[in-house]
Image (cartoon, rainbow, N blue to C red):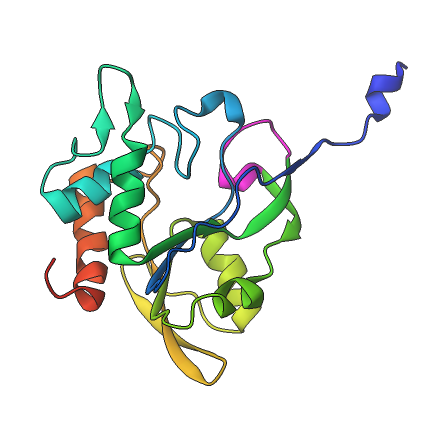
Amino acid sequence: MGSEAFAAPQVERHPLQPFVPQGARLLLLGSFPPAHHRWCMEFFYPNFTNDMWRIMGLCFCRDKQAFVDEEARTFRKTEIVELLQTRGIAIYDTAIAVVRTQGTASDKDLLVVEPTPLDALLARMPQLQAVATTGEKATALFADHFGIKAPKVGAWVPFSFQGRTLRLYRMPSSSRAYPMKVEKKALCYEAMLRDLYHDI
């Protein structure tokens, strides 16, 4: 047997720091970024086939292409960051170190080696009102950490943090692998956003 048969699994560390704008009211919380060769920009939800920024385009601009540069097959990072800063939307993931057991970007193939210190992350956002998990693994990790029952897709449950009652929303995954049209996903996100931003 070659020595490669006993090679230790490769641990990937999160390549990005949490995006936490001043006055953040909402935290979008995923699981872990895809492998870097799938990225089309240096930011969260960087896979061009992922629909997060199309969903946000529909919610805030009524145009799923608002943050998409179709010709360059990338997203408009400057406009995305401006939106997030203006609206007070933070972004991060529930793991800072993982092993891809099958070499894919799928949540089911992620083995979490080091979870994100969620208490420290949330403590950075004194105006936080809600967390929205964007996948099954992120939802499970967050719910387990806070000892609450995971909500159904499109619903929310309350949780306590530092003497405050916040909301955990469970949103449909923005991955194309999730069997729902982008327009229908956007309706779920829009309903949540209307709870927080009354001008949506």
x then y, percent, for residue 143: 49, 66
In the picture provided, is 120 more to the left or to the right than 42? right
x then y, percent, for residue 8: 80, 31
Magenta segment, principal secondary structure? loop
Q: Quarter holding the C terminus?
A: bottom left
Q: Residue at x 56, y 37 (%)?
A: 15
Q: Quarter holding the N terminus?
A: top right
Q: Residue at x 10, y 61 (%)?
A: 199
Residue 181 shows in the view: no
Question: Above or below — where is 138 with respect to 123?
Answer: above
Q: Work out whether residue 2 or residue 124 is closer to the camera in this orientation and state it.
A: 124
Q: Work out whether residue 177 or residue 35 is closer to the camera in this orientation and state it.
A: 35
Q: For residue 26, what is the image quadrant? A: bottom left
Residue at the outermost bottom position: 163
Residue 75 sits inside the magenta stretch:
no
Question: Above or below — where is 62 with respect to 153?
Answer: above
x then y, percent, for residue 169: 34, 63
Q: Residue at x 49, y 65 (%)?
A: 124
Residue segment shown in magenta:
100-109
Residue 105 sits inside the magenta stretch:
yes
